[in-house]
Image (cartoon, helix red, strand yellow):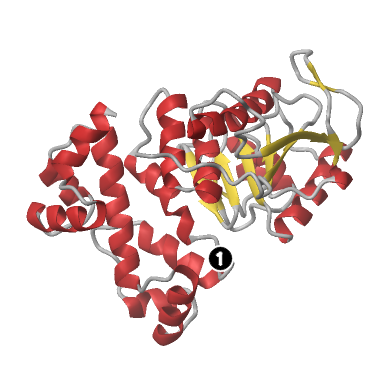
Amino acid sequence: MKRQKLDMNRRPPLVAIVLIEGCWASSAVLARELLQAAGTLHADSVDLLANRLFDVRLVGTGRAAVRSFGGMTLKPEARLDEIAPDVVIVPAQFAPTAETTAAEACIGAWLRAQHERGALIVSLAGALLLAKAGLLDRREATGLVSERTIFRSRFPLVRFLPSRRIVASDRLITVCGIGPTPDACAYLIEHFHGAADARRFLRHTSTEGLPAREQTVLWSSRFKRHRDAPVLAAQELVERDLHAPPRLGWLAAQVGLSERSLQRRLAAATGLNLRQYLAELRLERAEALLGSSELALIHVAQDCGFGSAAAFTRAFAARFGVPPGAYRRERRRG
């Protein structure tokens, strides 16, 4: 596949990595360097500046160096009040407590402001700081298993799911540890630059294939860039079970809309009706399974909610230009 040249006249998305005392320096540095390297994979060039997909900065409450829990110092390149990023990354903290420090309160207020103005907020096992900021109330989030007790006792409104590798909802992306950092970066690459670049990035940076359900979270994100909360809620209900998708009437009732209103708003937000949206999810999940598993085609079809292997093959070939067996062979060669 011929790779497109980067548009050097377009400003790359600005990413702010927030430094806080006691953080994991490795978490902040890993995210920074993965995003810096992403453009070189796109362009087949080692020139970081000429091929950057993101403008990545380390930021802090001040300009003074920040000390990680292990004693490494990281120097902010900007203060929080000097920057208006498109993305905020919150690195992991070492042994955080349930209490909110003055620095955490300051950062939490800034995080809320950035989310309100439309920025994506990404937690690399830093979900506790997002919870202290009130960003996770009545939302699902993942994080470290060791923080389960704190979430249960201090943040009962958060549906904390540490068994999940990555959770994305309403421009809030949480991952369960430092290990899935490439997955979070892939989400950002997909969001701003498309699924092809994100897949290429994961092939070069991830040591394990993502479970198909998690990949669906990544790739279907392109349908969730709107801010229509009832539609987002409906989308998440549809994604829970591709085998037995909900009926339109039930779905509309769950999100407080009429059937006609839900249809209209879903089409306005995604460009698809409910049937088309479900078909896209099934095909994207099938694509992920073909690339990350050895399941027979009939089992891929069943897992993704297709009525038969023949129906799956027809739909897949119409969408991707090749039948699923040929697609799997091409993925293995490439």
Say left or right for 45 vs 242.
right
Specify the quadrant of the image occupied by residue 249: bottom left
Can the viewer see residue 37 in this picture?
Answer: yes
Residue to which mark 1 is pinned: 226
- In this rendering, position of residue 4 left or right of residue 319: right
Res 28 → quadrant: top right
The residue positioned 72% from the left and 30% from the top of the image is 96
Question: Could you say where residue 247 lies in the image, as x and y percent from the top left?
Answer: 30, 74
Residue 101 visible in image: no
Locate residue 115, reporting x and y percent: 70, 55
Position of the C terminus by quadrant: top left
Query: Residue at image x 79%, y 50%?
Result: 84
**152 to the left or right of 214:** right
Residue 86: where, in percent of width, then height? 69, 50
> SS for tag 1?
loop
Give the amino acid type for the residue marked by disc 1 in the picture: His
Question: In terms of image quadrants, where is residue 30?
Answer: top right
